[in-house]
Image (cartoon, rainbow, N blue to C red):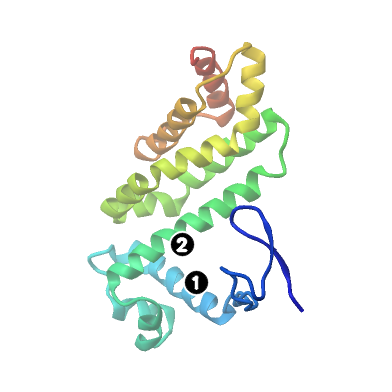
């Protein structure tokens, strides 16, 4: 049976027998390989432990496979070198962070509650033992991670706090420079890792609102 489709220019066409159509069914997307996902997660978790213990320089493929309890060939099935593993590991860290952030903020739709959840999440994450140990054990990797992830982080701050920025805009009666606010917030949060301060995130929320008054 001929199948009605929509071509790139928006016109309807029969898939079979018309120019530009193949008549072939669309390829089914493969399901994620749960075993491969579990193995890579195991390797990434081992990478975290080895890096915290020995740093990047003290980390080798052999130490990773020993820590993960997998064969050397298994690791090479997914990563051809230590450098490729570290690149993938950075992406893994970012994905885990993003998932945890969304889980923390999505239940909160009210602006004040969303800001409170957002700042509380970052306060806990950036002051965690693991975050500080990364910075102390492998500062070059940690700082490189901050640099590579900064622009993406700013975009995520802006998306996460859109309800907050909407609320502030209504209160102030003008549109705010959301990119500038998001970048400022991101820089404040990172600086708290480098130079810890004993602020409550409620106090920081008030300071951010004061800043918003002056950002057009």
Q: Is residue 49 above or below residue 213?
A: below
Residue 14, horizontal then vertical, whole percent: 70, 68
- Say which residue label 2 marks: 92
Residue 4, horizontal then vertical, whole percent: 73, 67
- Say which residue label 1 marks: 41
Residue 39, horizontal then vertical, whole percent: 49, 79
Label 2 packing within 10 angstroms: few (<14), some (14-19), many (20+)? some
Q: Are marks 1 and 2 in contact (CB under 8 Å)?
A: yes
Label 1 packing within 10 angstroms: few (<14), some (14-19), many (20+)? some
Q: Is residue 211 above or below residue 69?
A: above
Q: Residue at x 40, y 64 (%)?
A: 89
Q: Is residue 28 above or below residue 100?
A: below
Q: Residue at x 43, y 74 (%)?
A: 43
Q: Residue furthest left?
A: 57
Picture quadrant of residue 25 = bottom right
Q: Residue at x 42, y 85 (%)?
A: 70
């Amino acid at each position: 049976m001929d199948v009605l489709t929509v071509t790139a220019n928006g016109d309807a066409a029969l898939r079979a027998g018309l120019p530009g159509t193949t008549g072939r069914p669309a390829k089914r997307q493969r399901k994620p390989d749960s075993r491969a996902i579990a193995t890579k997660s195991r390797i990434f978790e081992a990478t975290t432990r080895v890096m915290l213990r020995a740093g990047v320089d003290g980390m080798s493929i052999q130490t990773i496979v020993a820590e993960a309890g997998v064969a050397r060939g298994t690791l090479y099935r997914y990563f051809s070198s230590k450098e490729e593993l570290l690149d993938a590991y950075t992406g893994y860290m970012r994905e885990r962070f993003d998932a945890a952030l969304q889980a923390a903020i999505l239940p909160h739709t009210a602006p004040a509650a969303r800001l409170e959840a957002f700042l509380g999440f970052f306060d806990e994450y950036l002051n965690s033992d693991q975050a500080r140990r990364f910075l102390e054990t492998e500062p070059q990797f940690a700082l490189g991670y901050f640099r590579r992830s900064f622009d993406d982080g700013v975009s995520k701050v802006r998306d996460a706090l859109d309800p907050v920025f909407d609320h502030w805009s209504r209160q102030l009666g003008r549109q705010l420079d959301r990119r500038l606010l998001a970048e400022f917030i991101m820089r404040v949060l990172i600086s708290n890792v480098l130079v810890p301060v004993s602020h409550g995130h409620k106090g920081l929320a008030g300071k951010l609102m004061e800043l918003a008054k002056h950002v057009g």
